[in-house]
Image: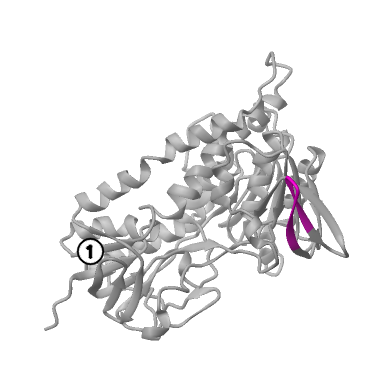
Amino acid sequence: MVKYDYDVLYIGAGHATFDGGAPLAKTGVKVGVIESGLIGGTCPNRGCNAKITLDEPVKMVREAERMSDIFEGDLKLDWTKNVEHKQEIIENLPQDLTERLESNGATIIRGHATFKNNHTVIVDNVGEVTAEKIVIATGLRPHRLNIAGTELAHDSEEFMNLKQLPEHITIVGSGYIGMEFATMANAAGAQVTVMLHSDKVLRDFYQPYVKMVVDDLKKRGVTFVENSRVQSFEKVGANYQVNYGDNQQLTTDWILDATGRIPNIDKLGLDNVGVKYDKTGVFVNNYLQTNIENIYAAGDVVSNNLPKVTPAAYFESKYLMKLFSGQTTEPIDMPVIPAVVFTSPRIAKAGVSVEEAKTKDYQISENDLANYWYYKVDKEPIAQSKQIHDKDGHLLGVTEISDQAQDAVNALLPAIEFKLDPEQIGRLTSLFPTIGYAAWHRA
């Protein structure tokens, strides 16, 4: 019988690894984790945790603005102090996650891994490491435009580390990152121009709600350039020039390339072992197993139609823990995965979309939340939701735009996931007054 260094070896140390890898090691399975960067990967270090910390003062400024007739004095966001606070929040997370893994028995191996064969990887400065099972959990990295001067642009991590906010920021891209950072920069006092690839913003969200967000940002001074066809970036004196469209130019102080994120797989040596993949990620079956029997993949690096969000990676990591520890032999059964964009207001969704509901025999109800008393407490001017029910009254999906959209959708997730009927929903008596109570009484 072949003896390997590890029973399970994870490549990458983000949510797709540590959420399941730590409890897996605790069961006695010998677990190794290879990571060349910060333990925790994108979300804790340069993604979700950092972003929501930077956004909290933005939300407060917006609320104070709406309630200015009650407050005295102006509330101004200090970007430098905001970034310092963000760093205070996230700086200990890699060590905390390291301790979580190691205290449960996992071994952390520092370096970059490349497959030699289906049971062996070569790690920089370490050498060969072997395992019975290997999990690819390398996530996504920022996409970079393939144009002249692309090196002059910056990525999302660099934006969140800006100690001084430039006077004018140009954002290329209008997905999650582009719109969230446009909101932050605008609230902190920067001039912002958003360059769109097409004429759509946040294409995965309900477009009438997206338009409300865009219209509000336009009123606040954000400029949107549709079908921009960005061609190159140049350094011109102390500034930068974005060349786009039909021989058009834009002068700016700083450029953010927010054109998406791509699977972090090109230096793994997947071709050495024949793992199948394409530009969307690694192909897996219903057991998160690749076409190579002992190699698995989890999290954002997987090619699927799920939102590339932390809850999906968390659930997949927990599933592999159960599979590898013998707690299940069943295929993965993914729950409803919600999604939210942290603009002001937010847009959140879960379950059946409005677009899908229109093609089926479902009931779509609309709620004007701005006139609901709880949303009047903080004077929200933009607040609406749409809920989708089947003919028997089961809640199938929801999408909401409001400052509290993420909490409202979270409250409704159990009804969607467990297909609660109206009588069961009626037995759920949330705390009052809370957004959960307000959400349930619309379900």
* Rendered residue at 31%/66% (across/down): 10
Q: Is residue 240 magenta?
A: yes
Between 324 and 188, the residue placed more toward the observer is 188
Q: Amino acid at mark 1?
A: Val
Answer with left or right where residue 437 lies relative to residue 287.
right
Instruction: Count the numbered circles shown.
Output: 1
Q: In the rendering, at what x and y percent does residue 441 appear?
A: 58, 41
* Rendered residue at 23%/74% (across/down): 131
* Rendered residue at 35%/62% (across/down): 317
Answer with left or right where residue 180 lies relative to residue 415.
right
Residue at which label 1 appears = 31
**Residue farthest to the front?**
237
Q: Quadrant of residue 106?
A: bottom left
Q: In the rendering, at what x and y percent does residue 84 appear?
A: 50, 33
- The answer to whether residue 120 of the structure is visible from this angle is yes
Q: In the rendering, at what x and y percent does residue 64 appear?
A: 67, 24
Judge the density around disc 1: few (<14), some (14-19), many (≥20) Cα neighbours within 10 Å: many
Secondary structure character of the magenta stretch overall: strand
Answer with left or right where residue 339 lies relative to residue 347.
left
For the record, the magenta segment spans 232-242
Answer with left or right where residue 63 lies relative to residue 306.
right
Q: In the rendering, at what x and y percent does residue 153 appear?
A: 65, 55
From this view, report whether residue 425 is shown above or below residue 186: below
Between 392 and 411, the residue placed more toward the observer is 411
Q: Is residue 139 magenta?
A: no
Q: Quadrant of residue 438?
A: top right
Between 75 and 233, the residue placed more toward the observer is 233
* Rendered residue at 39%/79% (across/down): 290
Disc 1 secondary structure class: strand
- The answer to whether residue 344 of the structure is visible from this angle is no
